Amino acid sequence: MTKLKDVAYVLRSKNAGPFYITIDVIFNDETIYEKVLKSTLFSREKIADIYQCDLNEVDIFPYEQAQSIKVSFPRKSISGDIDDTDLFGAQHHVPLMEQQIGLSEYDQESNGWNGKGAWEGIQTTSVSDALQGLTNLDSAIKPITDDLFVIGPAYPVRVRAADNLLVLKAIEEANPGDVLIIDGKGYEQNAICGDFVIGLAKTMGLAGVVIDGVVRDIQGIQSLNYPVFCRGTTVAASDKHGTGETGEPISCGGVPIHPGDLILGDTDGVTVIPKERENETLDKALEKQERDEVRERDVIGNTEAAHAYIRNQLVKAGRA
Ligand SMILES: O=C([O-])CC(=O)C(=O)O
Ligand SMILES: [Mg+2]
């Protein structure tokens, strides 16, 4: 998961007199600067919580021209006091730099996708039509809970059949909003995840989990109300030896998947949108859905229009 130290260009702290600390966080990318500024990390509540001080004494100054954020707050112990371990205040930035930032939006955009909102209401079937059915996962990979929709950039993991340790590693590494996509080799005797592992993915803010394999604790998973797609259920757990890879291209349900490709899952199953084809696929899928809606409105429930439609299709194919 992204930490402040992963995206800040400069992160330093110093005394602002004996009673206060000031921290400078400087960025060398405008987009990142803006996203970080909006994240929950730079709130007085959060800073007060990290540094155990009174939130009314926390100040946060964004300085747009320099793409920097200055934070100041009272020291827990006065500089040079008997229990002070940082005379010059030069180490106070460390707790801040280790903070995770909920940058899913930033990560999504920097990954080049249009975001969840753009895909709302788009069905797997329309994407399948747009991509000529070439990127649909094996149809045996189905939702555990119907009516749950998932879309997000793929975070892939490949494991050996019946070994799920690397799934935990992937959950830790993926960004909020990612879809964890697991190449479990289609093995059906040992569960890649149960309700606990799925609960971990949900806790870390992942958008959903897709598995070329099976799960257990089905009732527990259903009660999480969280999108999970797989080949079915079993009883046995997996080993935790740790064979496999995370964050690398995989094959899942017969489809090659690269990190950051979009994964779309709904009641009908799961399909993949290669990241370089997102805009084209979105346009085609929208167009297709609109055409389908018009056709349905005009034809369904109208016997005459239904006859005309069928006749027209047969004529077009030379089979009238
Ligand atoms: O711990 C496991 O590997 C599988 C399991 O039962 C769970 O996730 O609840
Ligand atoms: Mg369990």
Image (spheres, grey):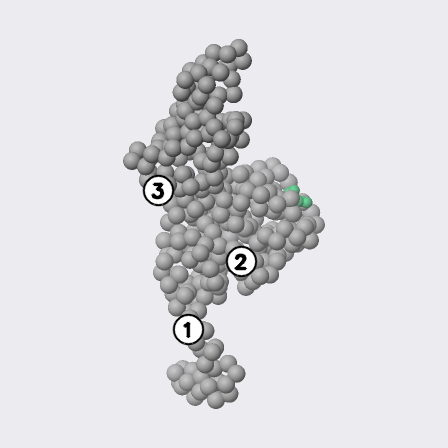
- The kind of residue tagged 1 is Arg
Name the residue beneath numbered marker 3. 31
Work out whether mark 2 precedes mark 1 in sequence or the reverse, and give the earlier one.
2
The location of residue 184, given as percent across then percent down, is 56, 48
At mark 3, the secondary structure is helix
The span from disc 2 to disc 1 (Cα, nearest Å) is 22 Å
Q: Quadrant of ligand 2?
A: top right
Quadrant of the rendered structure where residue 37 is?
top left
At mark 2, the secondary structure is loop
Q: Is there any visible trace of residue 244 in the rendered image? A: no
Question: Above or below — where is 251 with respect to 58?
Answer: below
| Residue 102 horizontal side relative to residue 203, left or right | left
Name the residue beneath numbered marker 2. 149
Q: Nearer the viewer, residue 246 or 62?
A: 62
Residue furthest out toward the left: 65
Quadrant of the rendered structure where residue 110 is?
top left
Work out whether mark 1 precedes mark 3 in sequence or the reverse, and give the earlier one.
3
- The kind of residue tagged 3 is Thr
- Label 3 within 8 A of ligand 1 by Cβ: no
Task: Give the residue displayed 46% in from the left and 14% down from the top.
Answer: 79
Name the residue beneath numbered marker 1. 291
The span from disc 3 to disc 2 (Cα, nearest Å) is 29 Å
Task: Give the residue displayed 38% in from the left and 27% down from the top.
Answer: 24
The span from disc 1 to disc 3 (Cα, nearest Å) is 37 Å
The location of residue 94, given as percent across then percent down, is 46, 25
